[in-house]
Image (cartoon, helix red, strand yellow):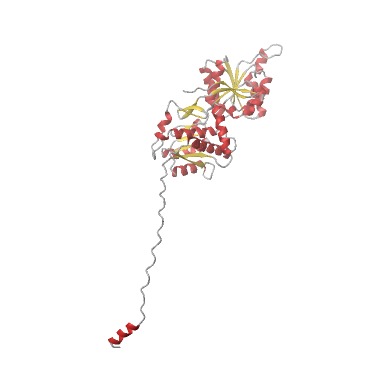
Amino acid sequence: MPALLLAVVAACAPRREPPAPPPPPPVEAPKPTEPAREARHQVAILVPLSGANAAVGQSLANAANLALADARSERVRLTSYDTAAPGGAAAATARALGEGAKLILGPLLAADVAAARSMAGARGVPILAFSNDRAVAGGNVFLLGFQPDQSVERVVAFARRQGAERFAALVPNGTYGERAAVAFTRAVEANGGRVVAVASFARVREQLPAAARRVSGYDARLKAGRAGNPAPPAFQALLIADSGAIAGAFLPSLQKFGAAPPAVMLLGTELWNAEPGITKVPALHGAYFAAVPDTRFRTFEARYRARFGGAPSRLASLAYDATLLAIGLADRWPMDAPFPQQLLADPRGFAGVDGIFRFRGNIAERGLEVQRVTAGGFETASPAPSSF
């Protein structure tokens, strides 16, 4: 086709408009900048949140969170880990350390403390354990649990000041009884008294009368008496180093063998403090025991009930006080740095729900009060010190 014809055809063809450009992409409104979260110290609490000890463990976790709320701390972040979940305390510890914990509160049981200590120690992470087993203390492990030897020492010293010179004790078989017996002997001797008898027993109700007869020296007293009447017991104060329930079970036999109040001053241990029901046992009225003071615990208990709707375990104060300790030291704990373990050695100690305490040899030394069992409850016979 000639070039001219091509030009004419092209001129007669319909004109095609160029395609419209695509619309511009929508412009998103700028998102408000989120304020940076303030850095906080990572603290873990390791407690049994399932299994047989779940009720105590949950009470401990609740108390720790209550302390955090009461202190209104913005410096500490607390996370709970279940030591009764699959893998036990070792798995809970590994998870806590993996998530950045620089301080561990708990565990509760001595076996769980043993499972956690080497793993935490390798990371330079201290453990404030709720156990009272001295065997697991040392290194990076500090014990907050109530110590029976401190209770025994305090109540023996009190009895000695009340005029008792000769002492006897009933102690259960096992580690607790062995420790109580050693503490009892040392305390009596340190306070210028004399140990007359120590008898051990199995926690079997049928065997308690025989133990009561042995410690009372009844057979020898019967021979030394006149007209079939036994001589008075050789001791003025008797320690029953076990629960209040066991002490109550001993009383009928002790009365039978003439070694019960009012002839003998009856002494107990810190275990009695968790047994308000013993005030309903008339034969225990007038008995003494040493324990942490209860005044602040009653206030704590009321706040706990208001927040969680139930009564706390008596051990819950350990978690509350441990959390307060961590919060109190937060300002002297550089962010993202290991917990400054040396701060725990402050000889002035610390204060909490359970009164004053300080760490001596990685074990909490506490200021204890002596309480007397009465029909109306426990009364303070000798107040706890306010400072060391």
Residue that sits furthest to the right in the current view = 227
Please state, as top left, top right, bottom left or bottom right, where the N terminus lies in the image: bottom left
Residue that sits furthest to the bottom in the current view = 1
Q: Is residue 219 left or right of residue 53?
A: right
The answer to whether 15 is drawn above or below residue 322 in the figure is below
Residue found at x 46% / y 42%: 96
The answer to whether 160 is drawn above or below residue 46 in the figure is above
- Residue 6 percent coordinates (x, y): 30, 85
Q: In the figure, residue 291 lies in which quadrant?
A: top right
Q: Is residue 314 visible?
A: no
The answer to whether 145 is drawn above or below residue 287 in the figure is below
Q: Is residue 287 visible?
A: yes
Residue found at x 41% / y 52%: 31
- Residue 259 percent coordinates (x, y): 65, 18
Residue found at x 41% / y 55%: 29
Q: How many marks?
A: 0
Residue that sits furthest to the left in the current view = 3
- Residue 75 percent coordinates (x, y): 43, 38
Q: Is residue 344 left or right of residue 384?
A: left
Q: In the figure, residue 361 lies in which quadrant?
A: top left
- Which one is nearer the viewer's eye here, 318 or 214? 318
- Which one is nearer the viewer's eye here, 114 or 92? 92
Residue found at x 43% / y 43%: 100
- Residue 45 percent coordinates (x, y): 49, 39
